Amino acid sequence: MNLVSYYKDRAKEYEKIYSKPERQDDLQNASIYLQHVFADKNVLEIACGTGYWTERIAASASSIFATDVNESVIDVAKRKIIPNQNVSFGVADIYNFNAINKYESLFGGFIMSHIKMQDIDKFLMTINNLVYPRGKIVFMDNNFVEGSNLPITNTDEEGNTFQTRKLEDGSIHLVLKNFHSENFLRLKLNGIADEVKFIKLKYYWILEYNNL
């Protein structure tokens, strides 16, 4: 399916996923961790969505340029009240990113699970090219926890997994959602990253590394 169209349609209801009671401790711990990692840094955020994590990182970052391929979610994000006024937004596709200069650090929340397995290497190289050598790169995404995550309903020949999701308008979508292991991610970063850290919470994981 077309993920861009799906998230455009989902924009107004997207943040309901963060209201699940069992995930609140993880969300708080992740927020604290990200605020520590990005304290006083200039951050490029990709796939910012409706700005849930933008708002939290902005509490400590020097500045954030928050981007997404979907203008509909950017519009939602812009309506958030961010006291520090240190966030700017832009509609951008990382594969066609017009970056005059590289960035000090980068955050991508819940984007890697939507990258096809066969495209992960290209994705990581694209990301690293946006950041200075020794710059900080952080990804966050889901662990699969039965009962909290929707079940996997399809798997293709490349090992990509898919969930069947229903939006409030009644439409049903088959959505690419890969759940990566620590070993898989470390293998993919071999030779292109340094000081790799993997933080495994119950419902989420955080991957932090320095660009080579």
Image (cartoon, helix red, strand yellow):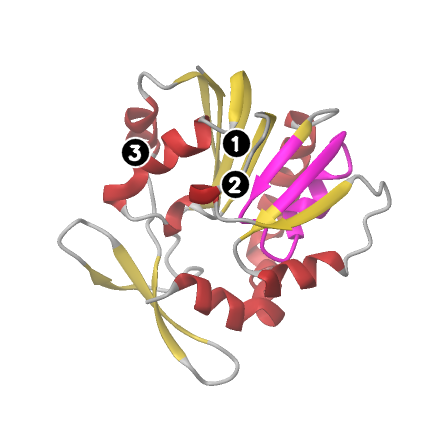
Q: Give neighbour class at mark 3: few <14, some 14-19, many 20+ (Cα, 10 Å).
A: some
Mark 2 vs mark 3, CA separation in Å = 15 Å
Mark 1 vs mark 2, CA separation in Å = 6 Å
Three-letter code, disc 1: Val
Three-letter code, disc 2: Gly
Q: How many marks?
A: 3
Residue assigned mark 3: 121
Whole-percent x, y for residue 144 in the image: 37, 51
Range drawn in magenta: 43-66
Can residue 105 be seen by looking at this rendering?
Answer: yes
Residues at circles 1 and 2 in contact by the CB criterion of under 8 Å:
yes
**In terms of depth relative to the viewer, which is nearer, 56 or 95?**
95
Which image quarter: residue 11? Answer: bottom right
Task: Tell which circle, 1 or 3, labels the residue nearer the N-terminal end.
Answer: 3
Mark nearest the camera among 1 and 3 is 3
Whole-percent x, y for residue 94 in the image: 47, 43
Residues at circles 1 and 3 in contact by the CB criterion of under 8 Å:
no
Mark nearest the camera among 2 and 3 is 3
Residue assigned mark 1: 138
Mark 1 vs mark 3, CA separation in Å = 16 Å
Residue assigned mark 2: 108
